[in-house]
Image (cartoon, helix red, strand yellow):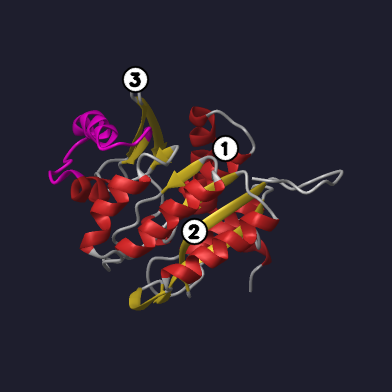
């Protein structure tokens, strides 16, 4: 990363992910999160989706060479302090992103291995899953799968909170340097996530279960918030804790507002507040 000479510069974060036409997840959620947390956000769009709060009705993949062009354009000129990676729909796209990480020595990469949307739509080709593990797990500072994604990656169920530390360890053995295994799909009044880095002990992060009507884009938002805090040079455990706190607030603010007829979005900037709405 080469910074231009100037008295002051923004903390910059790049998201490489798919676009959500409904505005609640993907690139749109990432950029809102970066702005809310005081960072300058940039994007390389990997796919267009026709999507709303009720589901995904279409996916149009961006050619790998154009994804490469987007990354090269912003990084060569503006630079970045951290990268969030989301939806990569094909093996060729995974290859292109891995090559860009190496070419630009992209720092503080947070990989959210998006495979299935919250409404159940498959977002990645089967061949891309193996490439994701082989090429991006070793290049990422943190991988943030939910339980469904962990089960797909490991080929076995993760059925309880007791299973989560061993599952996180198994994900490290696939090549990740650190894993945040998200346990939101398990039942209970508390949501448990497990953070585990190589050579460390599992760190449990608990939060009260939020209103499930407004969770569209929560995973995208969490990974982009972690990237934003890493860009501000917080250590990984503190960045994860701070991101959790931010996401919980954004969920609670979003729950005050009815957006769409399905799973609604978070309120990333906590604005407009419900008292100002019509």
Q: Residue 228: x, y in percent?
A: 59, 44
The residue depicted at 35 percent of the width and 42 percent of the height is 137
Please tell me which residue lies in front, 115 or 184: 115
Residue 248 relative to residue 171: left or right: right
Depth check, mark 2 against mark 3: the one in front is 2
Depth check, mark 2 against mark 1: the one in front is 2
The residue depicted at 61 percent of the width and 40 percent of the height is 231
Q: Which residue is mark 1?
A: 230
- Residue farthest front in this picture: 103
Q: CA distance from mark 1 to mark 3?
A: 20 Å
Please tell me which residue lies in front, 40 or 255: 40
Residue 30 relative to residue 124: left or right: right
Q: Verify whether residue 72 appears in magenta.
A: no
- Range covered by the magenta-colored residues: 154-178
Seen in the picture, residue 255 relative to 162 is either above or below; the reply is below
Residue 122 relative to residue 276: left or right: left
| Quarter occupied by the C terminus | bottom right
Q: CA distance from mark 2 to mark 3?
A: 30 Å
Q: Which mark is residue 201?
A: 3
The earlier-in-sequence mark between 2 and 3 is 2
The earlier-in-sequence mark between 1 and 3 is 3
In the figure, residue 90 lies in which quadrant? bottom left
Q: CA distance from mark 2 to mark 1?
A: 16 Å
The residue depicted at 31 percent of the width and 51 percent of the height is 132
**Helix, strand or loop status at disc 3:** loop
The residue depicted at 19 percent of the width and 37 percent of the height is 160
**Helix, strand or loop status at disc 2:** strand
Mark 2 and mark 1 in contact? Answer it, CB < 8 Å.
no
Q: Verify whether residue 176 appears in magenta.
A: yes
Q: Which residue is mark 2?
A: 16
């Amino acid at each position: 990363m080469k910074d231009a000479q100037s008295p002051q510069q923004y903390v910059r974060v790049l998201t490489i992910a798919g676009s959500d036409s409904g505005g609640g997840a993907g690139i749109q959620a990432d950029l809102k999160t970066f702005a809310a947390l005081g960072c300058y956000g940039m994007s390389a769009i990997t796919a267009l989706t026709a999507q709303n709060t009720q589901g995904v009705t279409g996916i149009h993949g961006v050619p790998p060479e154009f994804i490469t062009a987007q990354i090269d354009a912003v990084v060569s000129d503006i630079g970045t302090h951290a990268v969030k990676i989301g939806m990569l729909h094909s093996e060729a796209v995974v290859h292109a992103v891995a090559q860009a990480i190496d070419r630009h020595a992209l720092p503080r990469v947070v990989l959210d291995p998006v495979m299935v949307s919250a409404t159940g739509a498959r977002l990645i080709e089967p061949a891309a899953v193996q490439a994701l593990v082989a090429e991006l797990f070793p290049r990422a500072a943190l991988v943030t799968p939910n339980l469904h994604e962990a089960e797909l990656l490991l080929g076995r169920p993760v059925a309880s909170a007791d299973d989560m530390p061993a599952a996180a360890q198994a994900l490290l053995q696939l090549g990740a340097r650190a894993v945040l295994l998200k346990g939101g799909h398990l039942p209970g009044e508390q949501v448990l996530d497990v953070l585990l880095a190589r050579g460390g002990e599992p760190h449990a992060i608990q939060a009260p279960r939020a209103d499930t009507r407004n969770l569209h884009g929560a995973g995208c938002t969490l990974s982009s918030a972690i990237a934003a805090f890493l860009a501000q040079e917080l250590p990984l455990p503190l960045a994860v804790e701070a991101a959790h706190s931010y996401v919980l607030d954004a969920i609670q603010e979003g729950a005050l507002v009815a957006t769409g007829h399905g799973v609604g979005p978070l309120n990333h900037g906590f604005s407009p507040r419900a008292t100002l709405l019509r």
